[in-house]
Amino acid sequence: MASSILVVDDETSLRNSLARVLRGNGYSVRVAGCAEAALGEARKEAPDLVLLDVCLPDASGLEVLTQLKQLNEHVVVIAMTAYESTRDALLAMKRGAYDYLSKPFNLDAVKLLIKRALESAQAPNSGEEPAGAPCQRHCAQCPCPWRGKPAARLCGDPWQGSACDRMIGTSPAMCNVLDIIHRLPANSGSNVLIEGETGTGKELAARAVHELSSRATEPILAICCGSIPRELMESELFGYEGGAYTGARPEGKLGVFEAAGGGTLFLDEIGELDLKLQVKLLRVLETKEFARVGGLKRIRLRARLIAATNRHLKREVDEGRFRPDLYYRLNVVQITLPPLRDRRNDIIPLAETFLREYNALFGKHFETISAPARRLMENYAWPGNIRELRNTIERIVLLETGDALLPNHLPQEVVSSVPTVTGPPAEGESSGDKLLDVERRCIVTALARSGGNVVSAARLLGLRRGALRYRMDKLGIPKDELVPHPLTD
Protein backbone atom coordinates (compact mmCIF):
# COMPACT_ATOMS: atom_id res chain seq x y z
CA MET A 1 0.00 0.00 0.00
CA ALA A 2 1.35 3.41 -0.96
CA SER A 3 2.51 5.68 1.89
CA SER A 4 0.31 8.72 2.38
CA ILE A 5 1.83 12.21 2.49
CA LEU A 6 0.19 15.50 3.51
CA VAL A 7 1.79 18.66 2.05
CA VAL A 8 1.02 21.77 4.09
CA ASP A 9 2.11 25.11 2.61
CA ASP A 10 0.36 28.39 1.84
CA GLU A 11 2.20 28.76 -1.48
CA THR A 12 -0.11 27.15 -4.03
CA SER A 13 2.56 26.60 -6.67
CA LEU A 14 4.96 24.96 -4.22
CA ARG A 15 2.48 22.53 -2.68
CA ASN A 16 1.08 21.58 -6.09
CA SER A 17 4.57 20.99 -7.49
CA LEU A 18 5.48 18.82 -4.52
CA ALA A 19 2.22 16.89 -4.82
CA ARG A 20 2.76 16.26 -8.53
CA VAL A 21 6.33 15.02 -8.05
CA LEU A 22 5.46 12.78 -5.11
CA ARG A 23 2.43 11.27 -6.84
CA GLY A 24 4.71 10.46 -9.74
CA ASN A 25 6.83 8.48 -7.28
CA GLY A 26 3.92 6.33 -6.14
CA TYR A 27 2.83 8.17 -2.99
CA SER A 28 -0.74 9.01 -2.05
CA VAL A 29 -0.68 12.81 -1.62
CA ARG A 30 -3.10 15.33 -0.15
CA VAL A 31 -2.51 19.08 0.18
CA ALA A 32 -3.54 21.86 2.57
CA GLY A 33 -2.91 25.59 2.46
CA CYS A 34 -3.45 26.46 6.12
CA ALA A 35 -3.37 24.98 9.62
CA GLU A 36 -7.14 24.39 9.84
CA ALA A 37 -7.23 22.50 6.54
CA ALA A 38 -4.16 20.48 7.50
CA LEU A 39 -5.64 19.32 10.80
CA GLY A 40 -8.92 18.55 9.06
CA GLU A 41 -7.16 16.33 6.52
CA ALA A 42 -5.21 14.62 9.31
CA ARG A 43 -8.39 13.85 11.24
CA LYS A 44 -10.10 12.40 8.17
CA GLU A 45 -7.21 10.06 7.39
CA ALA A 46 -3.97 9.88 9.33
CA PRO A 47 -0.99 10.53 6.99
CA ASP A 48 2.27 8.61 7.26
CA LEU A 49 4.33 11.76 6.65
CA VAL A 50 3.66 15.51 6.71
CA LEU A 51 5.67 18.16 4.87
CA LEU A 52 4.85 21.14 7.09
CA ASP A 53 5.65 24.80 6.46
CA VAL A 54 6.52 26.44 9.80
CA CYS A 55 4.95 29.76 8.71
CA LEU A 56 1.23 29.41 7.99
CA PRO A 57 -1.31 32.23 7.63
CA ASP A 58 -3.68 31.14 10.41
CA ALA A 59 -1.40 29.47 12.97
CA SER A 60 2.17 28.64 13.81
CA GLY A 61 3.58 25.48 12.25
CA LEU A 62 4.84 24.55 15.73
CA GLU A 63 1.26 24.50 17.03
CA VAL A 64 0.18 22.37 14.06
CA LEU A 65 3.06 19.96 14.74
CA THR A 66 2.00 19.55 18.36
CA GLN A 67 -1.60 18.81 17.36
CA LEU A 68 -0.49 16.39 14.62
CA LYS A 69 1.55 14.48 17.20
CA GLN A 70 -1.47 14.41 19.53
CA LEU A 71 -3.59 12.92 16.74
CA ASN A 72 -0.92 10.35 15.81
CA GLU A 73 2.32 10.15 17.78
CA HIS A 74 3.94 8.05 15.03
CA VAL A 75 3.42 10.54 12.20
CA VAL A 76 6.69 11.65 10.56
CA VAL A 77 6.97 15.42 10.14
CA ILE A 78 9.51 17.26 7.98
CA ALA A 79 9.47 21.02 8.55
CA MET A 80 9.91 23.42 5.63
CA THR A 81 11.43 26.81 6.26
CA ALA A 82 13.04 29.89 4.78
CA TYR A 83 16.27 31.37 6.18
CA GLU A 84 14.49 33.87 8.44
CA SER A 85 12.46 31.13 10.20
CA THR A 86 15.23 28.60 10.71
CA ARG A 87 15.02 28.87 14.49
CA ASP A 88 11.33 27.84 14.29
CA ALA A 89 12.36 24.81 12.25
CA LEU A 90 14.89 23.82 14.89
CA LEU A 91 12.23 24.22 17.57
CA ALA A 92 10.06 21.93 15.45
CA MET A 93 12.78 19.29 15.57
CA LYS A 94 12.86 19.60 19.35
CA ARG A 95 9.11 18.92 19.34
CA GLY A 96 9.51 15.74 17.32
CA ALA A 97 10.02 16.69 13.66
CA TYR A 98 12.28 14.26 11.80
CA ASP A 99 14.23 16.99 9.97
CA TYR A 100 13.79 20.29 8.17
CA LEU A 101 14.30 21.60 4.65
CA SER A 102 15.44 25.13 3.83
CA LYS A 103 13.71 26.76 0.85
CA PRO A 104 14.47 26.66 -2.01
CA PHE A 105 15.27 22.96 -2.05
CA ASN A 106 16.19 20.30 -4.57
CA LEU A 107 13.24 18.02 -5.42
CA ASP A 108 15.46 14.95 -5.83
CA ALA A 109 16.89 15.60 -2.38
CA VAL A 110 13.36 15.95 -0.98
CA LYS A 111 12.35 12.60 -2.45
CA LEU A 112 15.33 10.83 -0.91
CA LEU A 113 14.80 12.48 2.48
CA ILE A 114 11.15 11.36 2.45
CA LYS A 115 12.20 7.83 1.54
CA ARG A 116 14.67 7.70 4.41
CA ALA A 117 12.22 9.23 6.87
CA LEU A 118 9.55 6.65 6.03
CA GLU A 119 12.06 3.80 6.25
CA SER A 120 13.20 5.10 9.64
CA ALA A 121 9.60 5.19 10.86
CA GLN A 122 8.96 1.62 9.69
CA ALA A 123 12.05 0.29 11.49
CA PRO A 124 12.68 2.57 14.45
CA ASN A 125 14.28 -0.11 16.61
CA SER A 126 16.28 -1.98 14.03
CA GLY A 127 19.54 -0.96 15.70
CA GLU A 128 21.41 -1.22 12.44
CA GLU A 129 24.48 0.92 12.00
CA PRO A 130 24.11 3.36 9.10
CA ALA A 131 25.87 2.35 5.91
CA GLY A 132 29.29 3.83 5.52
CA ALA A 133 29.82 4.50 9.25
CA PRO A 134 33.32 5.80 9.83
CA CYS A 135 35.71 4.25 12.30
CA GLN A 136 33.87 1.96 14.73
CA ARG A 137 36.34 2.54 17.53
CA HIS A 138 35.31 6.20 17.45
CA CYS A 139 31.60 6.05 16.73
CA ALA A 140 30.27 2.84 18.26
CA GLN A 141 29.23 4.87 21.30
CA CYS A 142 28.79 8.16 19.42
CA PRO A 143 26.48 10.42 21.48
CA CYS A 144 25.50 12.54 18.49
CA PRO A 145 21.70 13.12 18.64
CA TRP A 146 21.58 13.42 14.83
CA ARG A 147 23.36 10.10 14.19
CA GLY A 148 21.79 8.20 11.33
CA LYS A 149 19.66 11.09 10.05
CA PRO A 150 20.31 14.52 8.53
CA ALA A 151 21.79 17.10 10.88
CA ALA A 152 20.67 20.65 11.58
CA ARG A 153 22.22 22.94 9.01
CA LEU A 154 21.65 25.85 6.68
CA CYS A 155 23.84 24.55 3.89
CA GLY A 156 24.83 21.21 2.36
CA ASP A 157 22.66 18.52 0.79
CA PRO A 158 19.75 17.56 3.05
CA TRP A 159 20.14 13.91 2.11
CA GLN A 160 23.77 13.58 3.16
CA GLY A 161 23.14 12.16 6.62
CA SER A 162 24.79 13.22 9.84
CA ALA A 163 28.37 14.47 9.79
CA CYS A 164 29.33 11.70 12.23
CA ASP A 165 28.24 9.13 9.65
CA ARG A 166 30.01 11.00 6.85
CA MET A 167 33.44 11.23 8.46
CA ILE A 168 34.69 8.09 6.74
CA GLY A 169 38.30 7.03 7.08
CA THR A 170 40.61 4.39 8.55
CA SER A 171 43.90 5.91 7.39
CA PRO A 172 46.21 7.12 10.19
CA ALA A 173 45.71 10.74 9.13
CA MET A 174 41.91 10.52 9.33
CA CYS A 175 41.96 8.52 12.56
CA ASN A 176 44.00 11.36 14.07
CA VAL A 177 41.34 13.87 12.95
CA LEU A 178 38.55 11.69 14.38
CA ASP A 179 40.48 11.29 17.64
CA ILE A 180 40.64 15.06 18.09
CA ILE A 181 36.95 15.56 17.26
CA HIS A 182 35.80 12.84 19.66
CA ARG A 183 38.11 13.95 22.48
CA LEU A 184 36.57 17.44 22.61
CA PRO A 185 34.37 17.75 25.72
CA ALA A 186 30.69 18.06 24.84
CA ASN A 187 30.30 21.20 26.95
CA SER A 188 33.36 22.93 25.49
CA GLY A 189 32.88 26.32 23.87
CA SER A 190 36.51 26.63 22.77
CA ASN A 191 37.24 28.03 19.32
CA VAL A 192 38.28 25.53 16.65
CA LEU A 193 40.42 26.19 13.57
CA ILE A 194 40.14 23.71 10.70
CA GLU A 195 42.79 23.78 7.97
CA GLY A 196 42.89 21.76 4.77
CA GLU A 197 42.90 21.97 1.00
CA THR A 198 39.71 22.78 -0.90
CA GLY A 199 37.38 19.78 -1.01
CA THR A 200 38.80 17.90 2.00
CA GLY A 201 35.61 18.22 4.07
CA LYS A 202 36.24 21.16 6.40
CA GLU A 203 32.54 22.00 6.75
CA LEU A 204 31.77 18.36 7.45
CA ALA A 205 34.36 18.35 10.25
CA ALA A 206 32.80 21.53 11.66
CA ARG A 207 29.37 19.90 11.62
CA ALA A 208 30.78 16.81 13.37
CA VAL A 209 32.24 18.99 16.14
CA HIS A 210 28.85 20.71 16.49
CA GLU A 211 26.87 17.45 16.52
CA LEU A 212 29.03 15.92 19.25
CA SER A 213 28.69 18.98 21.47
CA SER A 214 25.97 19.95 23.91
CA ARG A 215 24.95 22.60 21.33
CA ALA A 216 23.72 19.97 18.86
CA THR A 217 20.06 20.92 19.24
CA GLU A 218 20.88 24.56 18.45
CA PRO A 219 21.60 25.79 14.89
CA ILE A 220 24.92 25.67 13.10
CA LEU A 221 25.11 28.63 10.71
CA ALA A 222 27.74 28.88 7.99
CA ILE A 223 29.03 31.95 6.20
CA CYS A 224 31.82 32.09 3.61
CA CYS A 225 34.14 35.03 4.22
CA GLY A 226 35.37 34.95 0.62
CA SER A 227 32.00 35.11 -1.14
CA ILE A 228 30.56 38.34 0.33
CA PRO A 229 31.79 41.82 -0.67
CA ARG A 230 33.89 43.50 2.00
CA GLU A 231 31.45 46.41 2.43
CA LEU A 232 28.57 43.99 3.20
CA MET A 233 30.46 41.52 5.36
CA GLU A 234 30.15 43.48 8.61
CA SER A 235 26.35 43.61 8.40
CA GLU A 236 26.20 39.92 7.50
CA LEU A 237 28.22 39.06 10.60
CA PHE A 238 26.74 41.48 13.13
CA GLY A 239 23.44 42.60 11.56
CA TYR A 240 22.25 46.19 11.40
CA GLU A 241 19.63 48.50 12.87
CA GLY A 242 16.86 49.93 10.69
CA GLY A 243 18.09 52.83 8.58
CA ALA A 244 21.73 52.21 9.50
CA TYR A 245 22.76 53.03 5.92
CA THR A 246 21.23 53.75 2.53
CA GLY A 247 19.33 50.70 1.31
CA ALA A 248 19.06 49.10 4.76
CA ARG A 249 15.76 47.48 5.68
CA PRO A 250 13.58 49.70 7.91
CA GLU A 251 13.13 46.82 10.37
CA GLY A 252 16.85 46.03 10.52
CA LYS A 253 18.43 42.61 10.13
CA LEU A 254 19.90 39.86 12.29
CA GLY A 255 23.52 38.97 11.66
CA VAL A 256 24.78 35.39 11.88
CA PHE A 257 26.43 36.03 15.27
CA GLU A 258 23.00 36.81 16.70
CA ALA A 259 20.99 34.28 14.65
CA ALA A 260 23.25 31.40 15.77
CA GLY A 261 22.03 31.88 19.34
CA GLY A 262 23.66 29.28 21.56
CA GLY A 263 24.67 27.09 18.61
CA THR A 264 27.73 27.19 16.37
CA LEU A 265 28.93 29.78 13.89
CA PHE A 266 31.08 28.38 11.08
CA LEU A 267 33.26 31.00 9.38
CA ASP A 268 34.52 29.37 6.19
CA GLU A 269 37.60 30.73 4.38
CA ILE A 270 38.53 32.92 7.35
CA GLY A 271 41.82 33.75 5.62
CA GLU A 272 39.86 35.93 3.16
CA LEU A 273 38.52 38.22 5.89
CA ASP A 274 39.48 41.88 5.51
CA LEU A 275 42.10 43.13 8.00
CA LYS A 276 39.73 45.79 9.41
CA LEU A 277 37.09 43.16 10.07
CA GLN A 278 39.74 40.94 11.64
CA VAL A 279 40.19 43.66 14.28
CA LYS A 280 36.44 43.74 14.98
CA LEU A 281 36.22 39.96 15.12
CA LEU A 282 39.13 39.85 17.58
CA ARG A 283 37.34 42.36 19.80
CA VAL A 284 34.16 40.26 19.75
CA LEU A 285 36.08 37.11 20.72
CA GLU A 286 37.82 38.92 23.56
CA THR A 287 34.76 40.66 25.06
CA LYS A 288 32.10 38.09 24.04
CA GLU A 289 29.93 41.04 23.00
CA PHE A 290 29.03 42.82 19.77
CA ALA A 291 26.66 45.48 18.45
CA ARG A 292 24.68 45.69 15.24
CA VAL A 293 25.86 48.15 12.61
CA GLY A 294 24.35 51.53 13.52
CA GLY A 295 23.35 50.31 16.99
CA LEU A 296 24.59 50.99 20.52
CA LYS A 297 23.09 48.04 22.38
CA ARG A 298 25.67 45.42 23.34
CA ILE A 299 24.59 41.85 22.50
CA ARG A 300 26.17 38.89 24.27
CA LEU A 301 27.89 36.33 22.07
CA ARG A 302 26.60 32.87 22.96
CA ALA A 303 27.63 30.90 19.87
CA ARG A 304 30.76 28.82 19.56
CA LEU A 305 33.09 29.82 16.73
CA ILE A 306 34.60 27.34 14.27
CA ALA A 307 36.77 28.82 11.52
CA ALA A 308 38.17 27.10 8.43
CA THR A 309 40.68 27.96 5.74
CA ASN A 310 42.37 26.36 2.75
CA ARG A 311 45.42 28.53 3.38
CA HIS A 312 48.36 27.85 5.67
CA LEU A 313 47.24 30.45 8.20
CA LYS A 314 50.51 30.56 10.17
CA ARG A 315 52.32 31.40 6.93
CA GLU A 316 49.72 34.12 6.27
CA VAL A 317 50.53 35.54 9.71
CA ASP A 318 54.28 35.45 9.03
CA GLU A 319 53.75 37.30 5.74
CA GLY A 320 51.53 39.96 7.31
CA ARG A 321 48.24 39.00 5.66
CA PHE A 322 46.52 37.78 8.82
CA ARG A 323 46.59 39.22 12.32
CA PRO A 324 48.67 37.09 14.72
CA ASP A 325 46.49 37.95 17.74
CA LEU A 326 43.35 36.76 15.91
CA TYR A 327 45.16 33.64 14.71
CA TYR A 328 46.06 32.61 18.25
CA ARG A 329 42.57 33.46 19.49
CA LEU A 330 41.02 31.21 16.83
CA ASN A 331 43.60 28.44 17.08
CA VAL A 332 42.61 26.98 20.45
CA VAL A 333 41.94 23.57 18.89
CA GLN A 334 43.48 22.90 15.48
CA ILE A 335 42.23 20.22 13.11
CA THR A 336 44.18 19.63 9.89
CA LEU A 337 42.33 17.61 7.27
CA PRO A 338 44.63 15.54 5.02
CA PRO A 339 44.32 15.69 1.22
CA LEU A 340 42.88 12.59 -0.41
CA ARG A 341 46.24 11.72 -1.99
CA ASP A 342 47.61 11.17 1.54
CA ARG A 343 44.80 8.81 2.52
CA ARG A 344 44.53 6.51 -0.49
CA ASN A 345 43.10 3.66 1.57
CA ASP A 346 39.99 5.80 2.09
CA ILE A 347 39.33 6.45 -1.62
CA ILE A 348 37.34 3.28 -2.31
CA PRO A 349 35.22 3.37 0.91
CA LEU A 350 34.32 6.98 0.10
CA ALA A 351 33.54 6.11 -3.53
CA GLU A 352 31.34 3.19 -2.46
CA THR A 353 29.42 5.46 -0.08
CA PHE A 354 28.81 8.02 -2.84
CA LEU A 355 27.83 5.17 -5.18
CA ARG A 356 25.09 4.01 -2.80
CA GLU A 357 23.79 7.54 -2.34
CA TYR A 358 23.59 8.36 -6.04
CA ASN A 359 22.09 4.95 -6.80
CA ALA A 360 19.22 5.88 -4.49
CA LEU A 361 18.96 9.39 -5.88
CA PHE A 362 18.99 8.45 -9.58
CA GLY A 363 17.39 5.00 -9.37
CA LYS A 364 20.52 3.18 -10.62
CA HIS A 365 22.01 -0.16 -9.53
CA PHE A 366 25.81 0.09 -9.46
CA GLU A 367 26.72 -2.58 -6.91
CA THR A 368 30.51 -2.79 -7.16
CA ILE A 369 33.64 -1.05 -8.37
CA SER A 370 35.72 -3.38 -10.56
CA ALA A 371 39.27 -4.21 -9.45
CA PRO A 372 40.95 -2.39 -12.39
CA ALA A 373 38.82 0.71 -11.74
CA ARG A 374 39.74 0.59 -8.06
CA ARG A 375 43.45 0.57 -8.91
CA LEU A 376 43.09 3.51 -11.28
CA MET A 377 41.14 5.49 -8.68
CA GLU A 378 43.70 4.77 -5.97
CA ASN A 379 46.50 5.76 -8.34
CA TYR A 380 44.99 9.17 -9.18
CA ALA A 381 46.04 12.14 -7.00
CA TRP A 382 42.52 13.70 -6.83
CA PRO A 383 43.63 17.37 -6.73
CA GLY A 384 40.03 18.38 -5.99
CA ASN A 385 40.01 15.92 -3.09
CA ILE A 386 36.72 14.43 -1.82
CA ARG A 387 34.62 16.96 -3.74
CA GLU A 388 36.21 15.85 -7.03
CA LEU A 389 35.72 12.17 -6.15
CA ARG A 390 32.10 12.75 -5.27
CA ASN A 391 31.40 14.71 -8.45
CA THR A 392 33.06 11.96 -10.48
CA ILE A 393 30.83 9.28 -8.94
CA GLU A 394 27.73 11.45 -9.42
CA ARG A 395 28.54 11.93 -13.12
CA ILE A 396 29.12 8.20 -13.63
CA VAL A 397 25.90 7.11 -11.91
CA LEU A 398 23.92 9.81 -13.71
CA LEU A 399 25.18 9.03 -17.22
CA GLU A 400 26.25 5.36 -17.24
CA THR A 401 24.39 2.06 -16.81
CA GLY A 402 25.30 -1.34 -15.46
CA ASP A 403 25.90 -2.99 -12.11
CA ALA A 404 29.67 -2.33 -11.87
CA LEU A 405 31.80 0.80 -12.19
CA LEU A 406 34.38 0.04 -14.91
CA PRO A 407 37.58 1.78 -16.06
CA ASN A 408 35.89 3.10 -19.19
CA HIS A 409 33.43 4.97 -16.95
CA LEU A 410 36.22 7.00 -15.36
CA PRO A 411 37.35 10.40 -16.69
CA GLN A 412 40.42 10.53 -18.92
CA GLU A 413 42.53 12.27 -16.27
CA VAL A 414 41.94 9.39 -13.84
CA VAL A 415 42.73 6.68 -16.39
CA SER A 416 45.86 8.37 -17.70
CA SER A 417 47.28 9.50 -14.35
CA VAL A 418 50.87 8.63 -13.47
CA PRO A 419 51.49 7.06 -10.06
CA THR A 420 53.16 9.41 -7.59
CA VAL A 421 55.05 8.81 -4.37
CA THR A 422 53.40 10.94 -1.68
CA GLY A 423 55.95 10.49 1.10
CA PRO A 424 58.42 8.17 2.83
CA PRO A 425 57.42 4.59 3.63
CA ALA A 426 54.94 4.19 6.45
CA GLU A 427 55.95 2.60 9.74
CA GLY A 428 56.57 -1.10 9.20
CA GLU A 429 56.89 -0.64 5.43
CA SER A 430 60.29 -0.93 3.72
CA SER A 431 61.49 1.36 0.94
CA GLY A 432 61.62 -1.66 -1.34
CA ASP A 433 57.96 -2.45 -0.69
CA LYS A 434 56.98 1.09 -1.59
CA LEU A 435 59.06 1.05 -4.79
CA LEU A 436 57.49 -2.26 -5.84
CA ASP A 437 54.07 -0.78 -5.21
CA VAL A 438 54.87 2.24 -7.39
CA GLU A 439 56.26 -0.04 -10.11
CA ARG A 440 53.12 -2.15 -10.01
CA ARG A 441 50.88 0.91 -10.33
CA CYS A 442 52.91 2.21 -13.27
CA ILE A 443 52.53 -1.07 -15.11
CA VAL A 444 48.80 -1.41 -14.42
CA THR A 445 48.24 2.20 -15.57
CA ALA A 446 50.26 1.67 -18.74
CA LEU A 447 48.29 -1.49 -19.52
CA ALA A 448 45.03 0.41 -19.00
CA ARG A 449 46.15 3.25 -21.27
CA SER A 450 47.23 0.82 -23.99
CA GLY A 451 43.97 -1.12 -23.98
CA GLY A 452 45.65 -4.21 -22.53
CA ASN A 453 48.22 -4.42 -25.34
CA VAL A 454 51.52 -5.51 -23.74
CA VAL A 455 53.64 -4.23 -26.64
CA SER A 456 52.08 -0.75 -26.48
CA ALA A 457 52.35 -0.72 -22.67
CA ALA A 458 56.03 -1.67 -22.89
CA ARG A 459 56.60 1.17 -25.35
CA LEU A 460 54.94 3.64 -22.96
CA LEU A 461 57.19 2.44 -20.14
CA GLY A 462 60.35 2.42 -22.25
CA LEU A 463 60.76 -1.36 -21.84
CA ARG A 464 61.02 -4.36 -24.12
CA ARG A 465 58.03 -6.69 -24.27
CA GLY A 466 59.94 -9.50 -22.56
CA ALA A 467 61.12 -7.21 -19.77
CA LEU A 468 57.55 -6.08 -19.12
CA ARG A 469 56.32 -9.68 -19.09
CA TYR A 470 59.07 -10.53 -16.58
CA ARG A 471 58.04 -7.66 -14.29
CA MET A 472 54.37 -8.60 -14.58
CA ASP A 473 55.15 -12.17 -13.49
CA LYS A 474 57.40 -10.90 -10.69
CA LEU A 475 54.74 -8.52 -9.35
CA GLY A 476 51.91 -11.03 -9.81
CA ILE A 477 49.93 -8.98 -12.31
CA PRO A 478 47.55 -11.48 -13.97
CA LYS A 479 46.28 -11.21 -17.51
CA ASP A 480 42.76 -10.44 -16.32
CA GLU A 481 44.05 -7.03 -15.25
CA LEU A 482 44.65 -6.08 -18.85
CA VAL A 483 41.61 -3.86 -19.17
CA PRO A 484 40.47 -1.97 -22.27
CA HIS A 485 41.38 1.70 -22.30
CA PRO A 486 38.25 3.84 -22.88
CA LEU A 487 39.84 5.66 -25.82
CA THR A 488 40.98 2.51 -27.60
CA ASP A 489 37.82 0.34 -27.49
Image: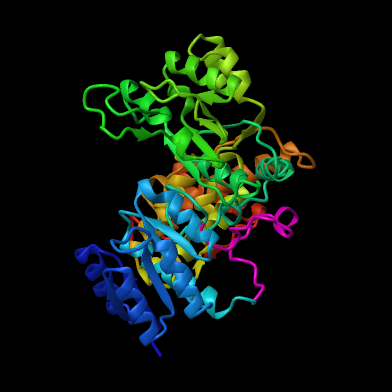
Percent across and percent down for residue 378 are 55, 49
Q: Where does the image place residue 86, in percent across and percent down from the top left?
A: 42, 50
Figure check: 116 above or below 335: below
Residue 197 spot, x, y in % from top left: 51, 33
Residue 250 appears in the figure: yes
From the viewer's side, name the closer residue of 458 and 292.
292
Tell me the residue at 32%/54% (across/down).
103
Residue 27 visible in the snapshot: no
Q: Quadrant of residue 395?
A: bottom left
Q: Residue at x 66, y 47 (%)?
A: 214
- Colour scheme employed for the rendering of this structure: rainbow
User: At 37% across and 22% down in the image, what residue appears?
Assistant: 293
Quadrant placement of the N terminus: bottom left
Q: Residue at 36% of width from left, 27% of height from top?
A: 235
Q: Is residue 393 left or right of residue 370?
A: left
Decide whether residue 139 is among the magenta residues.
yes
- Taking the image as shown, residue 142 lies to the left or right of residue 346, namely right
**Nearer-the-camera pick, 222 or 438:** 222
Q: Which residues are magenta?
A: 126-150
